[in-house]
Structures are given as C-alpha cells and as structure tokens.
Image (spheres, helix red, strand yellow):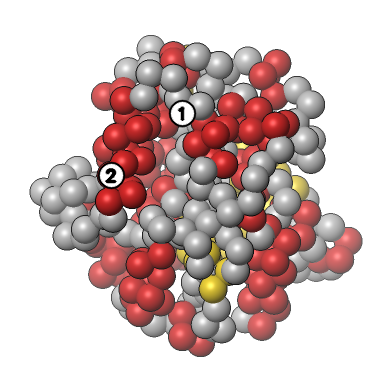
Amino acid sequence: MVVRISEDRFENLPSFDYDPHYVDVGDVRMAYVEAEPSPEAGDADETFLCLHGEPTWSFLYRKMIPRLADRGRVIAPDLIGCGRSDRYEDREAYTVEMHYDAVETFVAELDLTNVTLVCQDWGGLLGLALAAHRPDRFARLVPMNTGLPDGTQEMPPIWHQFADLVATADDLDVGRLIENGTYNDLSEDVRDAYRAPFPDERYMAGIRTFPGLVPQSPDDPGAELFATARDRLAEWEKPAFVLFAENDPITYANRDPMRHLLPTADDQPDVWIENAAHFLQEDAAEAIADRIVDFVDRT
C-alpha cells in the first residue's frame, strides 16, 4: 500500500519556505523543491541536483540552496519514503532498483541537463550510479560523504551499529538520529523538521530499510549496479570535486578512494571540510556551497 504524507506536517519549517512540486515516478510521487537562478546567476545555464541520504530529506539543503542559486537552477528532491514523497508501507517494496529507477525517472521527466550533481550518503550511491549510466545529463560531480559499495567493501563497526538501530529500534527519533550525525547541536525546531515526515511507524518503512540495502556481498541486489558505475566512473572525463567531512566516522575512509576513482578529482583542491560530521550540510553549509560555486566558476 502507498501512503501519502499530509502537507500539514510541513508547516512553519525553519528557513525552508519552498513550495513542493511532484513528479510521478511509477505508482508513487517524488516530491521536490526548486529555486530559480538568482539575478547574480545572469545567463548561466546551470542546474544543481541536490540528493540527500538516509534518513533526511531536501530540508537538509536549505542553507545551501540560496548560494547555489547564485549560479543556476537548484532542484532538491525527496527520495521515495522520505520527506514529502510518497512511501510504501511494505518494507519489501524498497529495493536498490526501485530507488534507482525513481531517481532516473525523476531526472528524465524534468529533462534535467548540464547537471552539477551534489550528493551525500544514499544520494551519492544513487546519483553517482545514474551519472555513470547517463553521463550525457551531467556536467560535474560533487560527491560528499558517500561511496559506491559493490559488496567487496568492509563497513566500519559504527555503521553496523547504526544499521541495527535504524532497523530494529522500537521508537526511532529521527531528529536525534540526525543530530548524532552532526558536529554541532541542532535546535529543537530543526530536529522537529527532520521528524516531520515520520508521524508514526506507517511512514518509516523507507528509512528502516536503507541500511539493509547496502550490498554486503557481490551477489547482493544492487552490487552489480554499483560495480558497473565504479567501472564507468573510472573513465569519467568531466570535472569532479570530492568534499568529505573530517569528523564523519562512517564515510571518512571512503574519501581518498573516491578521489582516486574519479580521474579528474585530482584537478580540484585536496580539502577536508572542517568541524563537520556525516550530515555536513548541517554543519558547514555555507562553506560547502561557496566551494561548489567556486568549482563551477573555474570549470
């Protein structure tokens, strides 16, 4: 069964007054917010596609969107099961293939081109895989705190602890969960904004299943998709700028392998985002957005 979240849950969000839009991606709707280019963008034909991870939603990019709009159009969707997007009640409906197909359909339906992909966590798994398979739509890549797990990797112990918590906790407090992944404390209204898409357990099947979808063996579903993406990205010729947080114990070790995978990553500054953890968009949004704008300007 498909359930739809009430818009009443999203009233009075702090610093996030964008109107929602929707795209049909099969039997569910994917929600997104959009910011048109600001006057500072001039005639720039740029599109930023900002993909979030687990268990957040497009609200995560609220502090980055205005700065990115100085250079172009900004699109920030909610993955299926997250934010304002529809969700399945049945956990078995959530697969890597379903999420990938939804993002691919979303990009095709909006006919997004000349895209600078800004992605983190599961947004990186799905977005980088799509860029690898549809490079004609993408101009640049900005992977942040993410990876492409093909089942041959070893996940750190803290990831296994997180995965067990998300899958089995009786009372999952999404606001606190996200704060545990930030370097800085969050205000109560921000924690409430992250809780907004999940009023009760009926709405949580998507976020409950994300960790279990990470391939743990090359034979697992999704492993071949990500392995093929890795092979194709090893031949990527367009600009790529890897931005990882120095205080993220989950993806810290992925940063150098990501820079080595993307042939053009060494053309960009070798930097870490300081005083930032897994949800670096919360901790260092303005600094990250400035770096991305500079990246666009020089490429």
Identity of the amino acid at label 1?
Gly
- Viewer-side residue, 6 vs 26: 6
Say few, some or many: other residues with alpha carbon within 10 Å of mark 2 (under 14 / 14 to 19 / 20 or more).
some
Question: What element does badge 1 sit on?
Answer: loop
Q: In this rendering, does residue 96 appear at all?
A: no
- Viewer-side residue, 11 vs 69: 11
Report the side of 232 relative to 32 (left or right). left
Answer yes or no: do the residues labelled 1 and 2 have beta carbons within 8 Å? no
Residue at left 62%, top 81%? 299
Residue 214 percent across, percent down from the top left: 27, 46
Residue at left 15%, top 45%? 220
Sequence-wise, the earlier of marks 1 and 2 is 1
- Viewer-side residue, 182 vs 238: 182
Identity of the amino acid at label 2?
His
Reading the image, the residue beneath label 2 is 160
Residue at left 66%, top 41%? 186
Mark on residue 135?
none
The vertical placement of 8 against 25, above or below, is above
Question: Spatial distance from mark 1 to mark 2, Cα to Cα?
Answer: 22 Å
Mark on residue 81?
1
The vertical placement of 272 against 250, above or below, is below
Say few, some or many: other residues with alpha carbon within 10 Å of mark 1 (under 14 / 14 to 19 / 20 or more).
many
Residue 32 percent across, percent down from the top left: 62, 38
Question: What element does badge 2 sit on?
Answer: helix
Residue 88 percent across, percent down from the top left: 40, 20
